[in-house]
Amino acid sequence: MQHFKTHLNDEAGTAALGAALARALAPGLAIYLHGDLGVGKTALTRALLHAAGHNGHVKSPTYALAEPYTVVIAGRATNVLHFDLYRLAGAEEFLDAGFREYFNHENVCIVEWPEKAGSVLPPPDIDVFLAVSGRGRDVECLALSDQGSQCLDRLHFAPNL
């Protein structure tokens, strides 16, 4: 499967990666973001949503658990669901909220803290791992499906070296 690794020197690098991911998106993708608090998961998602055409505020859905956005991907309106499961009490809460129904071929689902929902989450197409490295961030993207590989194939990103 496809694999992508880079170093982001600063917030501008995170924004550039978010924009590159936005250009590579396709409906049906599930992208799971992994990393410690403050590593840039929400910043990456915010940059992706703005680059995909969302003009409004993008907030962390820490308390609501999910925030929906509508953007245009491949010429059609597509729902992007941004999940932050940090405060999730357990996998049952995820199921009870009906979130699993959003994981389909029409939506894009971006999930922070996917490990909080355990095995009730559908498998991701792409796992993104972020880690603090010096003043910047190391990022690793792993495609775990054909659709995830196609997305990473479309990803054109030149790090800010």
Image (cartoon, rainbow, N blue to C red):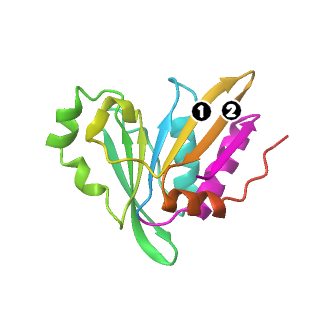
Which is nearer the eye, 54 or 143? 143
Q: Closest to the observer: 68 or 103?
A: 103
The image quadrant of residue 105 is bottom left
Apparent side of residue 62 relative to residue 88 in the rendered image (left or right): right
Image vertical order of residue 78 relative to residue 143, above or below: below
Number of the label disc, if any, that sits on residue 138: 2
CB within 8 Å, label 1 to label 2: yes
Quadrant housing the C terminus: top right
Classify mark 2: helix, strand or loop: strand
Q: What stretch is highlighted in magenta?
A: 1-27
Displayed quadrant of residue 152: bottom right
Q: Give the mark count.
A: 2
Q: Is residue 54 above or below residue 60?
A: below
Q: How crowded is mark 2: few (under 14 residues within 10 Å), some or many (20 or more)?
A: some
Q: Residue 90 carries which label?
A: none
Three-letter amino acid code at disc 1?
A: Leu
| Residue picked out by circle 1 | 130
Magenta segment: does it hold 138? no
Q: Is residue 130 left or right of residue 71?
A: right
